[in-house]
């Protein structure tokens, strides 16, 4: 059975780019445009991995969603990969503190994305 990946980003172009990159691997791909809609999709989908943009508008950004997922026992097996344009040490530390399993700094190569996703889902 294919691993499920939920791509969460407010920019449709970036969601499309991530989807096209991961389509080359046998993953079941789903999308959400913000943290709130992602939270609504998690229980019915039960994704294996969330690919989250950190900076999203609304009450639940990527860091907040990561924290929520990592704090809820029922979501315990879900891995989280954070994507951000911010690559400073403090940004990486915030991602780790939120419980992220991986962190990629934009721009990243398609190969880097595939390798990171494969490693997290291995």
Image (cartoon, helix red, strand yellow):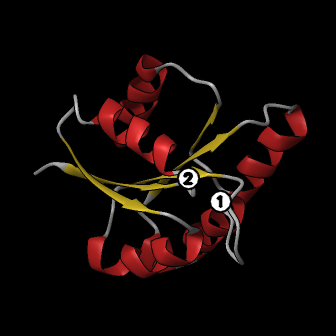
Where is 84 relative to 76, above or below? above
How many marks overall?
A: 2
Which label was assigned to residue 62? 1
Disc 1 is placed on an element classified as helix
**Between 75 and 13, which is closer to the camera in this rendering?**
13
Q: Residue at x 34, y 56 (%)?
A: 48
Q: Mark 2 vs mark 1: which is more N-terminal?
A: 2
Quadrant in which residue 78 is drawn: bottom left
Question: The C terminus is located in which quarter?
Answer: top left
User: Distance between the Cα atoms at labels 2 and 1?
Assistant: 5 Å
Q: Residue at x 62, y 68 (%)?
A: 65
Q: Can residue 120 be seen in this snapshot?
A: no
Q: Residue at x 79, y 36 (%)?
A: 86
38 left or right of 45 in image: right
Where residue 12 sits in the image (x, y, percent)?
Answer: 48, 51
User: Do labels 2 and 1 touch, CB within 8 Å?
Assistant: yes
Which label was assigned to residue 94? none
93 left or right of 35 in image: right
Which label was assigned to residue 52? 2
Where residue 117 sits in the image (x, y, percent)?
Answer: 40, 36
Q: Residue at x 31, y 34 (%)?
A: 20
Dot 1, crowdedness within 10 Å: few (<14), some or many (≥20)? Answer: many
Where residue 51 sits in the image (x, y, percent)?
Answer: 49, 49
Where residue 22 sits in the image (x, y, percent)?
Answer: 31, 35
Q: Residue furthest left?
A: 1
Where is 51 relative to 76, above or below? above
Disc 2 is placed on an element classified as strand
């Amino acid at each position: 059975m294919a691993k499920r990946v939920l791509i969460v980003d407010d920019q449709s172009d970036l969601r499309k780019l991530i989807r096209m990159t991961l389509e080359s691997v046998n993953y079941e791909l789903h999308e959400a445009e913000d943290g709130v809609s992602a939270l609504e999709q998690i229980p019915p989908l039960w994704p294996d991995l969330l690919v989250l943009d950190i900076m999203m508008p609304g009450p639940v950004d990527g860091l907040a969603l990561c924290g929520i997922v990592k704090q809820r026992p029922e979501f315990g097996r879900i891995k989280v990969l954070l994507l951000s344009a911010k690559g400073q040490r403090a940004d990486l530390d915030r991602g780790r503190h939120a419980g992220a399993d991986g962190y990629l700094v934009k721009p990243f190569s398609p190969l880097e994305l595939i390798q990171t996703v494969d490693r997290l889902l291995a």
